[in-house]
Each structure stands twice: as C-alpha cells, then as structure tokens.
Amino acid sequence: MKDYQLEEFILDMPENSLNLNIPYAFFTEHTTLNWNELYFGFKSQYVSINYAIEKAVSVVSINDSASNTLFELASLFKDEEDLAKKYINDLIEEKIIDSTLLENKQFMIDCKNKYLYIALLWLYQDPKKNNHPKGYENSLEEIDYSTKVYDVIWDFKVPSIPARDFRYFTMSFEVTEKNQELFLNRWYQFLEEQKQIVEKNI
C-alpha cells in the first residue's frame, strides 16, 4: 500500500458532508458509472436513488434482453424512491450489483478517485452556484471554496497522490480576491492529474 493512501480509512465510506447535489447527467458527461460504482454512490450519498432509475432507462433503451428488474426500475417515476430501493436489492440478488465490492480495497480506491474527480470538477465549474454545504443558510462567497475543497478531499480520505498534494496546498493557501486565479489554476492542474488516474481505470 502506497504511503499517500490512508490505509486504515480505505474501506470507510464517504458521507458527502457538503451535501453536494451533482446531476446524473454531469456524471455521464464526464465519466462512466457501472452498476457497482453507482451503488457506491448510493451508499456514500453522492448520488440519489433516482439515478438508478435514469441508468435503468438508458440500459433498457439499448438492450431488449435486459432483466425484468431493470425494465420495472426504468418504469418508475422519480418520486417512487421507496420502490427503487426494493429493485436495487433485487439487482443485488440477481448479481447485477455486487455489494461485497464495498469490502474490496482496490474497488473502493477506484470509486473514491472517480467520485472525488467528479465532485471537485462540479465545484470548479461553478463554485458560487454549486458550493452549498449543509448548515449554511446563505450562499458562500466564491473565495470561500478553498476550505470546502479541503473538506471534499478529506471526505474521500485522500485516495491519490494528486489529492494528497492538492490537499496540502489548500491547507496552506488562503484564497483572496487577488490570488484566487492562482488557486483556480492549481485546482485545474489537480483535475487534469486526477482525470488521468480515473481514465486508467475505466
């Protein structure tokens, strides 16, 4: 195990402490999510159970031989989350989802790297609009995002060298009106490095 990975936390599930609400379309635009990776998202609260409905719709639209469970899941409306949860359990029983992968260290590292990339890309593209953590009644000033970036990286327990390095950077860099462009450039550099790690595992 490489020293940048906090081994004792590898199997710890992120909790989406900032309550980021990342659209499913944003995920599919920038990466792929198989059923196991989507299940990781449900458990970590980075994606809504409704995303399973959207994924099922996309699967059955191109696969006439998909399981009956997927067809039934695809037929649900977005306000039928309780029914969707039942079908997720059915997908586990049918081995379409392997829930035991949440005990697999490499799977967890790969998922954490992918979701961390998407979460920080989401914030990067529009910090003022997207950066709304729990407990804040008012929207945050754009220059407040350095602390939030640190919080997101820590939520995933630093799964890569770029994440470690960028986390150290955020710890020592106080963003101001004058230097925020430098911070954004460093953030962009992290995203490019993290993207390479994610693409190797797709």
Image (tube, rainbow, N blue to C red):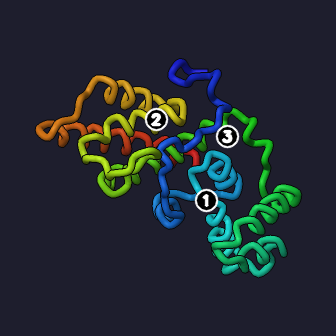
Q: Are marks 3 and 2 in contact (CB under 8 Å)?
A: no
Figure quadrant of the N terminus: top right
Residue 2: image quadrant is: top right
Horizontally, is 142 left or right of 157 in the view?
left
Instruction: Give whichever of 193, 159 is nearer the camera.
Output: 159
Question: Which amino acid does the dot numbered 2 rest on?
Answer: Ile
For disc 3, the marked residue is 107
The label number, if any, that marks residue 153 in the structure image: 2
Compared to residue 2, the image places residue 126 above or below, namely: below
The answer to whether residue 108 is seen in the rendering is: yes
Give left or right: position of 89 versus 17: right
- Residue at 62%, 64% (x, y): give it: 51
Residue farthest top in this picture? 3
Give whichever of discs 3 and 2 has the lower sequence position: 3
Q: Nearer the viewer, mark 3 or mark 1?
A: 1
Residue under label 1? 48
Quick check: marks 2 and 1 in contact, CB under 8 Å? no
**Which residue is located at x 62 percent, y 22 percent?**
7
Query: Residue 4 at what x, y percent from top left?
Result: 50, 22
